[in-house]
Amino acid sequence: MGSSRLSGRTALVTGSTRGIGLGIADRLAAEGCTVVVNAEDAAEVERVRDELARAHPDAAVVGAAADVSDETSVARMFAEVGETLGSLDILVNNAGIWQSTRFDEMESAEWNRVLGVHLHGFLNCSRRAVDLMPDGGVIISISSVSDTRAHERAVAYDAAKGAILAGSRAMAVDLGPRGIRVNCVSPGPIQTENWIAASTPESTARATAELPLRRLGTPADVAAAVCFLASDDAAFVTGQTLYVDGGLTAQARPAGGQPT
């Protein structure tokens, strides 16, 4: 890729061993970033770190295994990042898990696990990242069209995504005086491993037909939006949500299929 808008900057992407997170890490490396790959599984982190290093021989790629829902684990990860890189310019809060349970059948443990990964992860990582960020750093959180549109059997997931949107706006106000920009990217239907596993050819066809652009998104579509918000091209953009959804939220009714 010829562009290197982010050359010399450091970025940590949580949940970046697959799907949207992997697409973001790959694009950030291509844009010239030193990239920290994160997931809970250390073996997966090592595998993806090596994969990205081979794909981008001019980029530095670091692995950092941690459970983002666990404050101690996150503190340890950011201490290691600080020792290795010195500072952090970009944080992408991407880690998340999907839940499919009716509200009246959901156990507290499931609610806590979904909010733990999405919302506590958002808090734990953002708080630690700010300590490592120079003035002018960037925090981008991956939300979902679920932050404004309800899905069946997704109370915990939708609640977490809505909270991330609201929390990001509030963080943008608090961190603005330091020049730290805080934004969200909210994807619509994206063809990830999770989408493919949860969908049928028929449901995918319906979802595609209902989108104004008549195609599903890809992790690369989301990654492009993240890189824009991380770059100086978005230097006056904070407290905002960029919907990467093929026009879904422009319509009165949602597309079928699974949320991202």
Image (cartoon, rainbow, N blue to C red):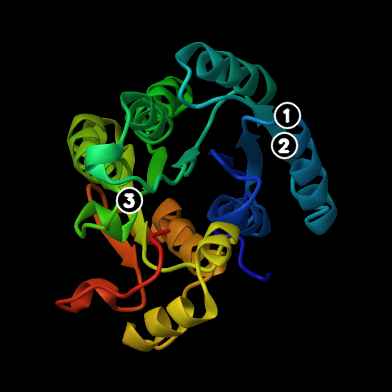
Q: Amino acid at mark 2?
A: Val
Q: Amino acid at mark 3?
A: Cys
> Given the current orientation, which residue lies at the most extreme top position?
72
Q: Is residue 186 left or right of residue 230?
A: left
Q: CA distance from mark 1 to mark 3?
A: 27 Å
Q: CA distance from mark 2 to mark 3?
A: 24 Å
Query: Where's the C terminus, which quadrant?
Result: bottom left
The kind of secondary structure element at disc 3 is: strand
Dot 1 and dot 2 residues touching (CB under 8 Å): yes
Q: Is residue 159 visible?
A: no
Q: CA distance from mark 1 to mark 2?
A: 5 Å
Residue visible at 41% across and 37% down?
137
Query: Where's the N terminus, which quadrant?
Result: bottom right
* Residue 20 at x, y percent in the picture: 54, 56
How many numbered badges does the structure rendering display? 3
* Residue 58 at x, y percent in the picture: 79, 52
> Given the current orientation, which residue lies at the most extreme front position?
105
Category of crowding for the residue at label 1, using alpha-carbon neighbours closer than 10 angstroms: few (below 14), some (14–19), many (at least 20): few
Mark on residue 42?
1
Which residue is nearer to you in this view: 3 or 252?
A: 252
Which residue is nearer to you in this view: 229 or 154?
A: 154
Mark on residue 184?
3
Q: Nearer the viewer, mark 1 or mark 3?
A: 1
Mark on residue 45?
2
Which residue is nearer to you in this view: 191 or 204?
A: 204
* Residue 255 at x, y percent in the picture: 31, 75
